[in-house]
Amino acid sequence: FLAALAYSHALAVNPAALVVRLNRAEAYLRLRYYSSAQYDAQRVLSAEDVTPDHAAKAVFRLAKAEYGRKQYANAEDSFLRWKEMHPHETAADSWIERCKTRRFESASGQYDWAKLYLVAKSKIRLDVANFVGPIAVCKMTHRGGGRGVVTTKDIQAGELLVRLRCSFYIYFLIFSTASHQTIRICLCLGSPL
């Protein structure tokens, strides 16, 4: 956070400092401030005096910001653009595959549930796409008003309707002390991937 703040102060003094803007974009990526990172990367790319090296860094950071914002098609295009600049480098290859996988997940609702279960045991942040199936939110005038979720077609038992990243969640940790007392701690965490 302090790095992003320091870069912001430097940009207040010299808004045209492309290296500072690139560094702030990287700091924003690490903080998961994807919209801000995207903005900074786009500003660097739109500068008239951008060097090829700075442009390449900006494209890669733009691609990562787009991925973080769940703009998988745009991210894939940006990673491919970076790959064209660096045909012998492999840094973007895994990102391109991840983009393709996320696009497939968001279009089909098909996930590798067994793999996700295993990953969730060790990682709290899962890298999966959102999916909205045959549902819609609409006014429920026939039920006295308000809004509700309805299906837009006949569905089968077990069909996935929606898979969305939560805004926050709660889980419990249970610790046993030396005297065998149990302590429960409830944690609220924000926005996992």
Image (cartoon, rainbow, N blue to C red):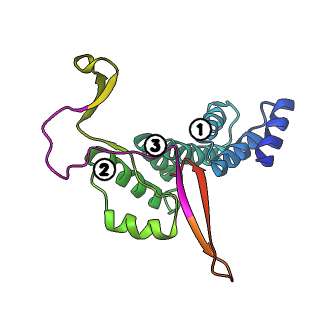
Looking at marks 3 and 2 on the same chain, the residue that comes earlier in the sequence is marked by: 3
Task: Tell me the magenta residue range.
Answer: 150-172
State the CA–CA distance, disc 2 to disc 1. Answer: 23 Å
Q: 5 above or below 171? A: above
Between circles 3 and 1, the one closer to the viewer is 3
Residue placed under numbered mark 3 in the picture:
70
Left or right of 59 in this view: 164 = left
Magenta: main secondary structure equals: loop
In the rendered structure, find residue 10 and report the number of the disc placed on it: none
Q: Amino acid at mark 3?
A: Lys
Residue placed under numbered mark 1 in the picture:
38
* Residue at the far bottom in the pictured view: 178
Q: Amino acid at mark 2?
A: Phe
**Residue 7 location (% of width, % of height):** 80, 41
State the CA–CA distance, disc 3 to disc 2. Answer: 13 Å
Q: 104 above or below 172? A: above
Looking at marks 3 and 1 on the same chain, the residue that comes earlier in the sequence is marked by: 1
Q: Is residue 80 magenta?
A: no
Q: Amino acid at mark 1?
A: Gln
Left or right of 115 in this view: 75 = right
Q: Is residue 152 magenta?
A: yes
Residue sitting nearer the eye, 171 or 73: 171
Residue sitting nearer the eye, 27 or 161: 161
Residue placed under numbered mark 2 in the picture:
104
Could you tell me which secondary element the residue under label 3 belongs to? Answer: loop
Left or right of 150 in this view: 116 = right
